Image (cartoon, grey):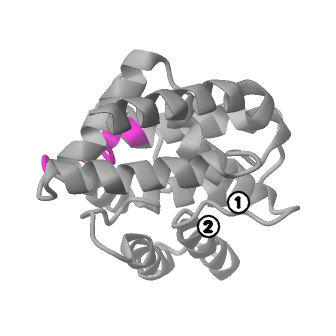
């Protein structure tokens, strides 16, 4: 499924429409390959799917989804810079300080996708962000191509080596997902995609 800025605009959860427009402009940057409006829409959809099975603070999680790749330039600390943007912008938008702190914490969590046991907000956001790993083969191929575009400055041999390290690290985890629903619904497909991509990237 594809998403347009206009369709996502209706899903912005705050009265401050200008802030939503700033975020949409960031996700619409033509330099992005994967971390774009389609990714944002996918994450929002997966949150909606997860909250039918998992409890969370929905406003904080949805806002964290909007901000989690607000800054994305394939450079270090993008999540930290996104979290700092959230901390400033959400205060200016009149969001309660407790919610602002939680949004920033959740955005920072997406740097490594390691939610602690009992952190249901973190589990929902991290699982929604990683749900792409369980996508159908054609969508997964689009995801891989999008990631490659974002690292176009990296020569192919170096990219393949780095990507293989990422794939092996993911496959070494006991589970890729945190919530019971995500593990049951997505784990097997995600691992199959990762194994297939790793085999393809190391055979070239």
| Residue 59 rendering spot, x and y as whole percentages | 65, 55
User: What secondary structure predominates along the stretch shown in magenta?
Assistant: loop
Q: Is residue 157 magenta?
A: no
Q: Which residue is mark 1?
A: 122
- Bin the neighbour count of mark 1 within 10 Å (Cα to Cα): few under 14, some 14-19, many 20 and up: many
| Residue 183 rendering spot, x and y as whole percentages | 77, 35
Question: Which residue occupies 36% across, 71% down?
Answer: 78
Question: Which residue occupies 80% across, 44% down?
Answer: 179
Q: Is residue 85 visible?
A: yes
* Rendered view: 102 above or below 204: below
Q: Looking at the image, which residue sits at the far right?
A: 118
Q: Which mark is residue 106?
A: 2
Question: Which residue occupies 63% across, 56% down?
Answer: 61
Q: Are marks 2 and 1 in contact (CB under 8 Å)?
A: yes
| Residue 175 rendering spot, x and y as whole percentages | 74, 45
* Rendered view: 12 above or below 70: above
Q: Which residues are magenta?
A: 28-39
- Residue 130 relative to residue 24: left or right: right
Q: CA distance from mark 2 to mark 1?
A: 6 Å
């Amino acid at each position: 499924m594809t998403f347009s800025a206009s369709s996502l605009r209706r899903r912005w959860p705050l009265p401050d429409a200008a802030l939503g427009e700033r975020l949409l402009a960031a996700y619409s940057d033509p330099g992005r390959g994967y971390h774009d409006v389609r990714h944002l829409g996918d994450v929002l959809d997966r949150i909606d799917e997860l909250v039918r099975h998992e409890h969370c603070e929905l406003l904080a999680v949805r806002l964290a989804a909007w901000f989690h790749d607000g800054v994305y330039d394939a450079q270090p600390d993008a999540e930290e810079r996104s979290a700092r943007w959230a901390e400033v912008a959400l205060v200016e938008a009149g969001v309660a300080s407790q919610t602002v702190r939680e949004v920033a914490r959740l955005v920072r969590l997406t740097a490594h996708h390691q939610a602690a046991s009992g952190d249901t907000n973190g589990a929902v956001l991290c699982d929604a962000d990683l749900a792409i790993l369980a996508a159908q083969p054609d969508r997964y191929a689009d995801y891989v191509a999008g990631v490659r575009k974002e690292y176009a400055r990296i020569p192919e041999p170096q990219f393949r080596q780095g990507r293989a390290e990422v794939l092996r690290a993911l496959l070494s985890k006991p589970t890729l997902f945190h919530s019971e629903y995500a593990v049951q619904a997505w784990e097997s497909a995600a691992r199959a995609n990762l194994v297939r991509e790793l085999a393809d990237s190391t055979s070239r």
